[in-house]
Amino acid sequence: MHCNVLIVDDSPILRAAIKKVVKLAGVDENRIHEAGNGQEALDILETVWVDLVLLDLNMPVMDGEQFAIELRKREELRDVRVVIVSTETNRERLDRITALGISDSLRKPFEPEDLCRIITDTMGVSS
């Protein structure tokens, strides 16, 4: 799969697990980028184009909701696909974030097959 993916999660262990699944979905390792919070992700997006962001919501410095708001404010980044991968259960918060044009969401803990399917479906690739 020829796309660039940005994994945004404050847990290095979860980033590694998600990265493994992204590779299983067919993304080359050199096309996978990682950030520990929303601000780091925005900094990465200043220099690297990504097609898909896999976004945790509960992070320090800048959380996933703040990141998604900033992403949609930027003309050049408005069409980047975002999939939420989070433990978040607050329905109001999830509805607010979904209204920003989120492609899909997956609750942690997740099955690798489910994340792989969401990645391929979101990117329009048949598995």
Image (cartoon, grey):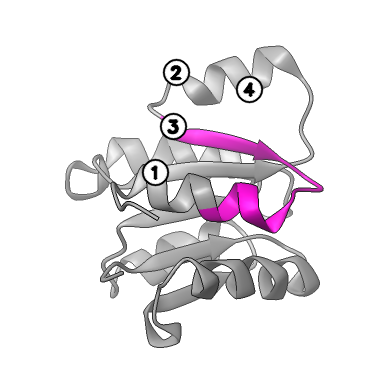
Rendering coords of residue 115 (x, y %): 59, 51
| Mark closest to the chain's N terminus, 1 or 2 | 2
Mark 2 vs mark 4: which is more N-terminal? 4
Quarter holding the N terminus is bottom left
Q: Which residue is mark 4?
A: 94
> First in sequence: mark 1 or mark 3?
3
Residue at 25 percent across and 40 percent down: it is: 78
Between the C-alphas of marks 1 and 2, the distance is 20 Å
Disc 3 is placed on an element classified as loop
Q: Look at 24% across and 41% down and name the residue there.
A: 79
**Would residue 77 be found to the left or right of residue 11 on screen?**
left
The three-letter amino acid code for the residue at tag 2 is: Ala
Q: Above or below — where is 29 with respect to 103?
A: below
Dot 4 or dot 3, earlier in sequence? 4
The type of residue carrying mark 4 is Leu
Question: Which residue is rendered at x = 40% and y = 52% of the image?
Answer: 120
Residue that protrudes farthest toward the bottom in the picture: 30
Instruction: Give the farthest residue toward the front.
Output: 127
Disc number lying in front (4 or 1) = 1
Q: Which mark is residue 99?
A: 2
Residue 34 lies in quadrant: bottom right
Quickly name the residue at label 1.
121
Asked if labels 2 and 3 touch by Cβ distance under 8 angstroms, the answer is: no
